[in-house]
Amino acid sequence: MPYIDPNKINRIVVKVGSSTLTHETGKLNLRRINKLAEALSDLKNSGHEVVLVTSGAVAAGAAKLCLRERPRETVEKQAAAAVGQCTLMHLYDKALSEYGAVTAQVLLTRDIVDNATSRQNAANTFRCLLDHGVIPVVNENDSVSTYELENLVSFGDNDRLGANVAVLCEADLLIILSDINGFYDSDPRENDEAKLIPVVTEIDDGLRGLAGGAGALGTGGMAAKLAAAELAMAAGVNVVLADGSDPNILIDICSGRARGTLFRAKEGVRKQ
Ligand code: GLU
């Protein structure tokens, strides 16, 4: 079976996390954002439909407000996100415009999962934006969502948001760019012998244990990535988890080159 057939990849959702978009200082990694914009614009120029799901609002806002560390209180995070979202959109708009691409800001809440009307509205908006050749830039509407996962009014993390957007847009591929190069059989930061799992066809308790169990790969949010992959796979969307340090990896993946870990979509669930 080929890795991913590039001829079958048209609509792509790319999710990029805060750790990929920021330096260790907490400030935005401007070069990476520019390279990401270049890769996304090039994918669009080569005929793909592209959606970006981006984190980084809280981080950008915290840096702009000169906070010494990432805020912990919900209200502080929400305020930081409100500040940072402007900065993020400004940078994406500027960078994507440089490459001739048009962008749009789409801020979502869990309503797109819980409320059929909101879901349909969001799906229609994405459809229309993509028909106009726009690259939508999506984040959670952090200032109205509540962060704590137990409240179940937020996506909890942008990996799940990315998977929901990929399903909503009926994407062919979700690429999760992270500071880890794929899914390993043990934590590569602690174990030199850790082996990358190149292809996952089914997520079972064994894998979930690797992602979220004691001493796991988990601190970087691997359990969330696995949950996101599971949601997308079940809806017939292929998922690749890959290292985001060089955004050109997006071009490799969309050309069918094996990178990171492929979570293979369940067959037969997509409308043809
Ligand atoms: N929406 C948050 C932000 O933009 C990030 C949430 C996440 O990365 O999981 O900062």
Image (spheres, helix red, strand yellow):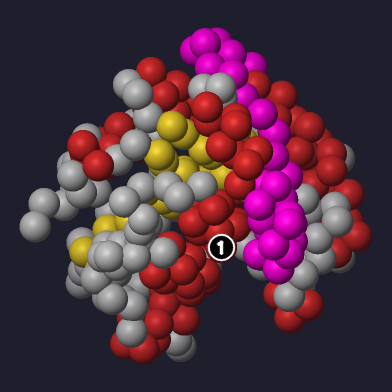
Residue 186 placement, left or right of 79: left
Which residue is at 59% across, 39% downward?
126
Residue nearest the observer in this picture, 257 or 83: 257
**Residue 8 picture quarter:** top left
Which residue is at 35% across, 24% downward?
47
Residue matched to label 1:
160
Ligand 1 lies under 8 Å from the Cβ of mark 1? no
Relative to 164, does residue 125 appear above or below in the rendering? Answer: above
Name the kind of residue labelled 1 in the image. Arg
The spot of residue 97 in percent (x, y) is 58, 14
Q: Which residues are magenta?
A: 94-122
Residue 256 appears anywhere in the view: yes
Q: Is residue 17 magenta?
A: no
Label 1 neighbourhood size at 10 Å, few (<14), some (14-19), many (20+)? many
Residue nearest the observer in this picture, 201 or 197: 201
The spot of residue 92 in percent (x, y) is 62, 26
Residue 20 placement, left or right of 48: right
Looking at the rendered image, the quarter that the N terminus falls into is bottom left
The spot of residue 197 in percent (x, y) is 22, 67
Which residue is at 86% across, 65% downward?
73
